[in-house]
């Protein structure tokens, strides 16, 4: 259960930050405080859902693989893009939607990698146990 809670917290705490950072780099936006607050406003719910799904898969199967993580990231990215598609705030808005989509997938993979690194189980060979 602690792994599930940690997974959700990592996704919620870091996912929007990573996505906002990728978006800022891709769009050459100013790194202002308001920009990253906005990234949490937009990205917190998709990050929460992604963390819940990855956490539940880990609880059931022991680990969420790359394919599951890819599907979760694609779904979260599609959700953000569809949500933001109703807001046309700038020229080249389609570019921003594409970047949001990619940023969501990247943030999902980075958060998954962090969770995987924290909860990595040593192989029997690394633990000194003969097969």
Image: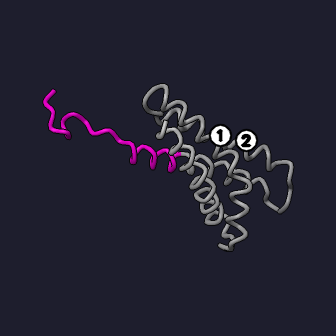
Examine the rendered structure and indicate whether residue 50 appears above or below residue 92.
above
Q: Quadrant of the C terminus?
A: top left
Examine the rendered structure and indicate whether residue 13 appears above or below residue 3.
below
Scheme of colours in the image? one colour
Frontmost residue, 124 versus 3: 3
| Dot 1: element | helix
For disc 1, the marked residue is: 49
For disc 2, the marked residue is: 79
Q: Is residue 85 left or right of residue 24?
A: right
| Dot 2: element | helix
Labels 2 and 1 touching (C-beta < 8 A): yes
Separation of residues labelled 2 and 1 (CA atoms): 11 Å
Which corner quadrant of the image does residue 17 belong to? bottom right
Residue range in magenta is 109-131
The percent coordinates of residue 31 (x first, y second) are 65, 73
How would you rate the neighbour count of disc 1 (Cα within 10 Å): few for under 14, some for 14-19, many for 20 or more?
some
* Picture residue at 60% right of the left edge, 63% below the top: 21
Q: Is residue 59 magenta?
A: no
The percent coordinates of residue 4 (x first, y second) are 51, 38
Q: Earlier in the sequence, mark 2 or mark 1?
A: 1
Frontmost residue, 48 versus 21: 48
Frontmost residue, 75 versus 90: 75
Examine the rendered structure and indicate whether residue 79 appears above or below residue 19.
above
The percent coordinates of residue 41 (x first, y second) are 74, 56
The percent coordinates of residue 63 (x first, y second) are 44, 33
Viewer-nearest of discs 2 and 1: 1
* Picture residue at 45% right of the left edge, 45% below the top: 115
Q: Is residue 125 magenta?
A: yes
* Picture residue at 50% right of the left edge, 33% below the top: 67
Examine the rendered structure and indicate whether residue 89 appears above or below residue 125.
below
Q: Residue furthest front?
A: 1
């Amino acid at each position: 259960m602690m792994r599930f809670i940690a997974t959700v917290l990592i996704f919620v705490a870091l996912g929007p930050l990573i996505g906002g950072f990728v978006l800022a780099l891709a769009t050459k936006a100013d790194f202002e405080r308001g920009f990253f607050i906005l990234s949490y406003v937009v990205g917190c719910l998709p990050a929460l859902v992604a963390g819940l799904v990855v956490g539940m898969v880990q609880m059931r199967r022991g680990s969420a693989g790359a394919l599951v993580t890819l599907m979760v990231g694609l779904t979260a990215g599609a959700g953000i893009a569809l949500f933001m598609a109703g807001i046309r705030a700038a020229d080249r808005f389609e570019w921003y939607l594409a970047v949001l989509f990619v940023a969501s997938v990247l943030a999902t993979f980075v958060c998954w990698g962090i969770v995987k690194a924290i909860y990595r189980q040593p192989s029997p060979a690394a633990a000194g146990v003969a097969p």
